[in-house]
Image (cartoon, grey):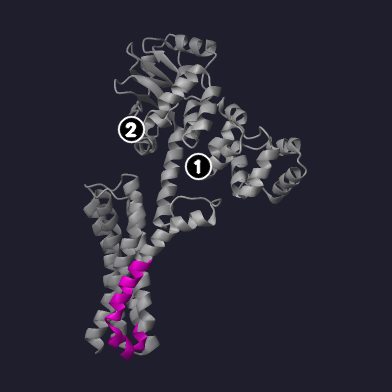
Amino acid sequence: MSDAGDFALDGRFASAVREAVEAQDGDAISVLMEPLHPADIADYLEQIDDSARSRLLSVWKGGVDGDVLSELEESLREGVIDGLEPQELASAVRDLETDDVVDLLEDMGAEQQGAVLEALDDADRVAVEQSLSYPEESAGRLMQREVVMAPQHWKVGQAIDFLRNEDDLPDDFYHVVLTDPRMKPVGYVTLGKLLGSRRDTNLTEIVEDSFRTFRVDQDEGDVAYAFNQYHLISAPVVDADERLVGIITIDDAMAVLDEEHEEDILRLAGVGEGSLSDKVIETTKRRFPWLAVNLVTAILASLVIAQFEDVIAQFVALAVLMPIVASMGGNAGTQSLTVAVRAIATKDLTGSNVWRVIRREVLVGLVNGLIFAVVMGVVGVLWFGSPVLGAVIGVAMVVNLVIAGLAGTVIPVVLEKLGVDPALASGAFVTTVTDVVGFFAFLGLAAMVLL
């Protein structure tokens, strides 16, 4: 069985490329790159710094094709495109499907867009310009215009003969879409069913039950969710009159799903979108706002602590133990928050089950709180010789873990209802709640019991 290391570029490859660049040997670079998949070439371009990348592209003239550009991270793609001559860029995208061309054009300036559009065939140029007229992050931008279709009254033999005689089929397709006389899609047939059926079989007899269509203005996130939820391979896209205008394939839908999942993970950590190739200033600007928010919440928690200065001064053990309560609450809150944000993204958390999920998270917090309360109670007795102190931290632990489970679920749900991205804003609120409640519960109980 192979592992991930089998698909990584090793140091010997990088050294060989560096030597070829220093020798200004474009042919040697082409020999090194030729066996690689476009995704591997894109990975290598992402791993080296801006200066090394510019030198490589200046020597390796015409080497970067459209498939490589499609695999590059968006944050890096613009810089690579800027380093290509107009004719190189036009040649690179000429053989791409229309959806990939649209994806590239979105990141280009007007001059580069013009060069690419000029290089396309008239039919492809019209198709790409039409796709660009649709809203960003919509099905219209995601779809490809190359569709294999057949009239719904055809038989299997007619469809097979058509496919064999057609010279301009897409490189990859999975279904033959059936249309009525008004060009409205009414079903589709998989290639497997088509080739496995008798020639005299009506196409309508072997259509797939999974058939569904998407509007050109439908959000690409909803499209990706439907592909994942209903195990779709491809799906037609229709205009306002429900006429067939394109098709979305699983690779594009899954790319959107991966991007959204990655986005959620990065936002939960407060780092936003970015890559390893980003400059220091860009990364700093992206992270600074959420660190500033975290500073404000930390000051708020410190203000709570300041209200109990006298208690802490008399019982130094409180200063030793109170970070434990806040830390446990923060971790528990993050666990509930992560589950809730993921469930919201996948549409599993809805109005019909939200209260059940909240109740479950609160009960999980209660059970964990009781278990760790016993542990910390024993620690309090053994460490400081004070059963009362052990009881105080135990109760505070229960309170904070219950509140953490509640806040970690309720806060992202409320933010989502308010139209705020829960992955982006929930973390700061949950941390604030668990810190404030943890310190207040622990020090407040200590003030009542120990003084």
The stretch of residues the image draws in magenta is: 295-318
Secondary element type, mark 2: loop
Image quadrant in which you'd find residue 156 = top left
Quadrant housing the C terminus:
bottom left
Residue 376 point in image, percent of width and height: 35, 78
Q: Nearer the viewer, residue 338 or 221?
A: 221
**Which residue type carries mark 1?**
Glu
Spot the residue most to the front.
Answer: 111
Q: Which residue is mark 1?
A: 74
The relative height of residue 435 versus residue 340 in the rendered view (above or below) is below
Labels 1 & 2 near each other (Cβ < 8 A): no
* Residue 198 at x, y percent in the picture: 45, 12
Which image quarter: residue 432? bottom left
Taking 119 as reference, is 225 above or below it?
Answer: below
Say above or below: 202 vs 276.
above
Q: Decide if residue 68 is on the left or right side of residue 363.
A: right
What predominant SS class does the magenta segment belong to?
helix
Residue 312 among magenta residues? yes
The answer for how far apart the CA atoms under marks 1 and 2 are is 22 Å
State the residue position of label 2.
Answer: 218
Q: Return the x and y of residue 37 as percentages of the image width and height.
A: 62, 37
Q: Nearer the viewer, mark 1 or mark 2?
A: 1
